[in-house]
Image (cartoon, rainbow, N blue to C red):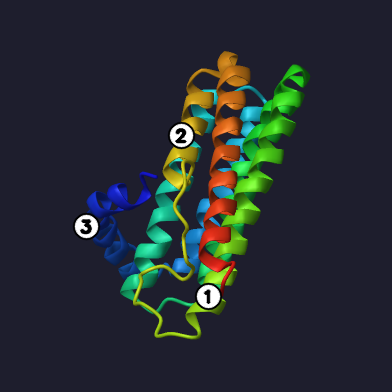
């Protein structure tokens, strides 16, 4: 819901940093992989209860996630780069609830509910994008900056980041934050299902 507005404001800064990374010889895919390593470290730190350091590494993960796209735009975007970006994002997002369950088994139910909710948002997001691409083949595809069509919803990347940051800042409130977050994820899933019915049922 906030992704487009935030990207508009962050784009100049990301473009500047992207040029620095390119001069250092770091490609978009390399940035994605480095960011993924930071994200996995963040999840491991959550499992051991080091929430502050987990937050630091998660922030680095998210910065690099924004930078890989900016680097790609400055160079040559590839379909594999877009694929890698999406897959690694979903792995990192799912690793956080699992890490909270590892830290404290009483978090297991909410962690499972969150991953269950991520399945809804993830599959509806990917399925809509795939069908959208097929429909667009019948027409001239609009020029866009991302390698995949991103359907808007209540919960997108920005909102997911905000909720994960809240979990890391207030780990004792994981249950409350997680249940609320999961419910919003399902609102997004239902909205995308309705949108797909409206957009694709007659196409």
Q: Quadrant of the C terminus?
A: bottom right
Q: Which residue is mark 1?
A: 133
**Residue 152 image position (x, y, % from top left):** 44, 52
| Label drawn at residue 12 | 3
Residue at (51%, 17%) from the top-left corner?
170
Mark 1 → mark 3, Cα distance in angstroms: 28 Å
Q: Are marks 3 and 2 in contact (CB under 8 Å)?
A: no
The quadrant holding residue 27 is: bottom left
The residue to which callout 2 is attached is 56
- Counting residues from the N terminus, which is met first, the one under dot 2 or under dot 1? 2
Label 1: state its secondary structure.
helix
Which element is circle 2 on? Answer: helix
Q: Earlier in the sequence, mark 1 or mark 3?
A: 3
Tell me where residue 140 appears, x and y as whole percent.
39, 85
The residue sitting at 62% across, 52% down in the picture is 122
Q: Residue at x 61, y 55 (%)?
A: 124
Badge 2 crowding class, 10 Å Cα cut-off, few under 14, some 14 to 19, many 20 or more, is some
Q: Nearer the viewer, residue 3 or 78?
A: 3
Name the spot of residue 185 as percent of width and height, x first.
57, 39
């Amino acid at each position: 819901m906030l992704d487009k507005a935030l990207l508009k404001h962050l784009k100049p800064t990301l473009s500047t940093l992207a040029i620095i990374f390119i001069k250092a010889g770091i490609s978009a895919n390399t940035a994605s992989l480095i960011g993924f390593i930071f994200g996995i470290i963040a999840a491991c730190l959550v499992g051991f209860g080091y929430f502050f350091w987990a937050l630091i590494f998660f922030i680095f993960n998210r910065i690099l996630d924004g930078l890989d796209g900016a680097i790609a735009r400055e160079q040559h975007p590839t379909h594999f780069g877009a694929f890698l970006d999406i897959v690694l994002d979903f792995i990192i997002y799912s690793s956080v609830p699992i890490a909270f369950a590892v830290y404290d088994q009483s978090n297991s139910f909410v962690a499972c509910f969150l991953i269950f909710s991520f399945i809804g948002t993830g599959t509806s997001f990917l399925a809509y994008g795939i069908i959208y691409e097929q429909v667009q083949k019948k027409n001239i595809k609009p020029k866009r900056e991302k390698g995949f069509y991103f359907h808007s919803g209540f919960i997108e990347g920005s909102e997911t980041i905000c909720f994960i940051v809240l979990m890391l800042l207030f780990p004792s409130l994981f249950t409350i934050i997680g249940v609320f977050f999961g419910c919003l994820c399902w609102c997004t899933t239902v909205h995308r299902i309705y949108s797909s019915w409206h957009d694709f049922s007659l196409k």
